[in-house]
Every structure is written in structure tokens, then in C-alpha cells.
């Protein structure tokens, strides 16, 4: 089934443990020209009437994006960082106040269940996650609390606004700078690895995202203050277009019930390969050491001549053979219609694929050989004795 000319923001994979958090509609949806988003972005505007201009402004550091639909979970108490360190894929035991990172919580088979952005302010660890994941994340953390000095809560009084790193500096009504998460993508963290290009050659190096945690009741005033300094309000479509162009995985889109982080090149910012034991670590280590994850993330450049785009979730075909599915679809202001897709790793990278009858050329994100940097050389097997006839 094909979508209309503007990319839809509906559906999406269901890989995360679903919560029952009620989406709070943003007051900015009452702005002139606001068109409501759908799917995982329900509750905020897809755009405010000029999606291409909004996207260009965001890329130039001239826009603020309403992302107040995202979930916020807080962890407080003196044991919080050491506890999160033992549960997750990331080394956060000594996370400095103000430092930003991200972590994965995996199932016993190494599949992604939760993928929050993480920033600590010295007293509270803030976890920013997908709307539908907030209750699931909080429930999982609560179940693992035991006798430790930690408290877990869903913070519905805090909302998220987004800018580029070069964008406007936001302030609360009291004049304070909010707690801010600065996206580490795509810089390969110490102790990690990458399955795609070097950091400096990665398209994600051209744009850095920031998420600002502001009191929900102050969102309209914070945005108006930014606009008074020359900023423009942009919608979720602009944010998604720049994310896709940066090859940045998103849990509500690229993750399904089988996803392991190697397939999405997610180890570079969310996994420390040399930290202590955590649930799913065996799979992470085994796939890293042996290579060849079963699938790989790829960017698809779509034929835009028909002015149509596929829906997220649509099947990707190599001839008549199903090889994967589309996860995110956007219209980028420079690249045109592009998509992220998760496909079988061994698909020929030079073959032209089709999605809903639309031709799609591949651009590699995860290398076809499925080998991370610094992967150990495979041990030599025993020499076979040649039999003399």
C-alpha cells in the first residue's frame, strides 16, 4: 500500500515492551497551521504548514521542535548510577553530572527492549524514551530495584523540546538552563565498536541533536522566548528527516522483536564491550566476536518520480524475494524521498530493491561483512591431514 506524497508518520515496529502511558496532546497543536502527527509521534505537530522550510531551519540551527510526547523516567537515590550500570549495556557507573549517553536494556537473548537517552544532573538520572515505552521501562526498573537505594518514577510534569546543537539556547521562566541531553551519535564511544563508516565520514557528524527537559506547563512560554530571539517552531517531520539522514536508529521505528544492536550500528554509542555482566551480554559479545549479524540497517534512496512513498513496515523485495522491511520514511530537503530499512545482511549491496513497486537504491550503513572494528581474528582451525592415495 502506498502513502500520499508527504510521508506518513503512522504505524512502526512493535519491538519495545509496550506501556499504557496516555499521550498528552501538546498545547502547540493549537498553533496556526499545525498538522497533527500520528503513530509514535501522536500528540505533537508533524509540521506547521511549511515542512521543507522547517527542516532547513532546523538543520541551520534556527528552530525548536516540540517533542513533548516523549516519555521521561527519573531515577533518584545514591545507588542509581551503579545500579543502572549493572542492568544495562552502557558504562554509566561514573557518569559525570551533565554528561550525555544512551543505554540499552536487553532481553536474555540480547534483543533490544528499551533504549533510553540518559543524562544525570548530580541528583537525578533522566531517561528519555518513546511515549509508549515509559511505563514499560519504569515497570522493568522497578522490578529490578530490590533493596537498593533508588527510586523510579514516570515524570509527566516534564516535557521534551528539541534543537540542533547550534540552535537556540532555551531557558525556563525562572531563567535557568534546563537539563539537556546532547546526542552522542555517531561518535564511537571508548570501549565500543562500529559497524559502519568512521565517525568523521559518517553523515550523522553533520548534525547534532539536543533534547531539553522543561516543565510541561512552561512549554508554550519557553518556545515563545526562543521565537523572540529569532527561532522558528518546527514539527516532528523535520526532526525525523534529519534523524534518518544521520542514519540514527530510533526504537519506535527501527526496533522489532528480533533486533540486536549490531544490526543497527547501535554499539557505537550505546554499548561498552568491556564492562561487567548484564542481561544479554553473551549475545552482544558472541555476535561481535564471530561477526555476521543476521540483518543490517540500510538507507534506501527512493524513486520519487511518482510522488509516492511507502509506509513504514512495508516489505522490501529483491526481485520476488522478501529481504526485509522499511522502518522509517521521510522526504529530506536535499536527499529527496529516503527511507531506513532493516534487510537481510547478505543482500547484494549493488542490487536495486523495490518497496511497494517503488525502486530503491541502497546506501550502506552496516557493512555487509557484519564485522565491527577491532573484532578479534578468528582462531585458526586444525589443519586437515591430507590423505595420500
Image (spheres, rainbow, N blue to C red):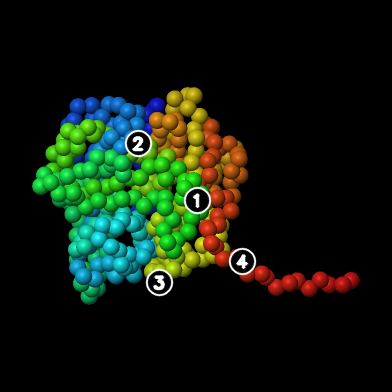
Q: Mark 1 or mark 4, which is nearer the start of the sequence?
A: 1
Residue 260 in view here: no
Q: Disc 2, disc 4: CB below 8 Å?
A: no
Specify the label residue 198 is tagged with.
1
Q: Mark 4 or mark 3, which is nearer the start of the sequence?
A: 3
Q: Residue at x 53, y 32 (%)?
A: 359
Question: Separation of disc 3 and disc 4 at Cα?
Answer: 23 Å
> What residue is shown with label 3?
277
In this rendering, position of residue 254 left or right of residue 350: left
Question: Separation of disc 3 and disc 2 at Cα?
Answer: 39 Å
Q: Secondary structure at mark 1?
A: loop
Q: Mark 2 or mark 3, which is nearer the start of the sequence?
A: 2
Dot 2 alpha-carbon crowd within 10 angstroms: few under 14, some 14 to 19, many 20 or more: many
Q: Which residue ends up furthest to the right in the rendered image?
A: 389
Q: Mark 4 or mark 2, which is nearer the start of the sequence?
A: 2
Specify the label residue 378 is tagged with.
4
Task: Please state which of the two labelled residues, at mark 2 or mark 4, is closer to the viewer.
Answer: 2
Instruction: Indicate the position of residue 94 as horizontal and vertical percent values.
Output: 30, 67
Q: Residue at x 28, y 63 (%)?
A: 96
Q: Secondary structure at mark 3?
A: loop
> What residue is shown with label 2?
59
Q: Secondary structure at mark 2?
A: helix
Vertical comparison of 378 with 163: above or below: below
Question: Separation of disc 3 and disc 1 at Cα?
Answer: 28 Å
Q: Residue at x 31, y 41 (%)?
A: 166
Dot 4 alpha-carbon crowd within 10 angstroms: few under 14, some 14 to 19, many 20 or more: few
Instruction: Indicate the position of residue 364 as horizontal and vertical percent values.
Output: 53, 44
Amino acid at each position: 500500500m502506498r502513502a500520499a506524497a508527504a510521508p506518513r508518520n503512522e504505524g512502526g515496529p512493535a519491538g519495545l515492551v509496550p506501556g499504557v502511558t496516555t499521550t498528552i496532546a501538546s498545547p502547540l497543536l493549537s498553533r496556526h497551521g499545525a498538522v497533527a502527527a500520528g503513530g509514535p509521534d501522536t500528540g505533537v505537530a508533524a509540521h506547521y504548514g511549511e515542512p521543507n522550510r522547517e527542516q532547513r531551519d532546523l538543520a541551520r540551527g534556527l528552530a525548536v521542535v516540540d517533542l513533548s510526547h516523549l516519555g521521561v523516567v527519573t531515577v533518584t537515590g545514591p545507588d542509581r548510577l551503579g545500579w543502572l550500570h549493572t542492568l544495562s549495556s552502557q558504562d554509566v557507573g561514573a557518569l559525570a553530572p551533565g554528561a550525555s549517553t544512551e543505554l540499552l536494556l536487553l532481553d536474555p537473548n540480547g534483543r533490544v527492549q528499551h533504549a533510553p537517552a540518559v543524562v544525570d544532573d548530580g541528583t537525578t538520572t533522566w531517561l528519555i524514551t518513546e511515549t509508549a515505552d515509559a511505563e514499560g521501562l519504569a515497570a522493568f526498573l522497578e522490578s529490578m530495584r530490590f533493596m537498593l537505594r533508588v527510586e523510579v518514577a514516570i515524570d509527566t510534569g516534564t516535557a521534551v523540546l528539541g534543537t540542533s546543537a547550534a540552535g537556540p539556547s532555551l531557558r525556563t521562566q525562572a531563567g535557568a538552563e534546563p537539563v539537556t541531553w546532547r546526542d552522542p551519535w555517531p561518535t564511537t564511544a571508548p570501549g565500543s565498536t562500529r559497524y559502519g563508516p568512521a565517525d568523521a565520514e559518517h553523515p550523522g557528524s553533520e548534525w547534532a541533536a539536543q533534547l531539553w527537559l522543561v516543565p510541561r506547563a512552561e512549554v508554550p512560554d519557553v518556545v515563545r522566548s526562543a521565537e523572540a530571539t529569532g527561532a522558528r517552531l518546527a514539527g516532528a517531520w523535520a526532526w525525523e528527516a534529519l534523524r534518518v539522514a544521520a542514519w540514527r536508529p530510533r526504537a519506535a521505528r527501527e526496533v522489532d522483536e528480533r533486533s540486536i544492536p549490531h544490526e543497527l550500528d547501535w554499539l557505537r554509542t550505546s554499548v561498552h564491550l568491556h564492562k561487567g555482566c548484564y542481561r544479554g551480554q553473551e549475545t552482544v559479545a558472541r555476535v561481535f566476536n564471530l561477526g555476521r549479524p543476521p540483518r543490517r540497517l540500510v538507507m534506501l534512496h527512493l524513486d520519487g518520480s511518482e510522488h509516492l512513498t511507502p509506509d513504514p513496515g512495508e516489505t522490501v523485495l529483491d526481485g520476488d524475494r522478501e529481504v526485509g522491511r522499511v522502518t522509517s520514511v521521510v522526504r529530506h530537503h536535499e536527499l529527496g524521498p529516503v527511507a531506513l530499512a532493516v534487510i537481510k545482511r547478505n543482500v547484494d549491496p549493488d542490487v536495486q530493491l523495490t518497496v511497494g513497486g517503488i525502486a530503491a537504491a541502497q546506501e550502506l550503513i552496516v557493512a555487509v561483512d557484519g564485522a565491527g572494528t577491532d573484532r578479534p581474528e578468528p582462531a585458526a582451525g586444525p589443519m586437515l591431514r591430507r590423505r595420500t592415495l
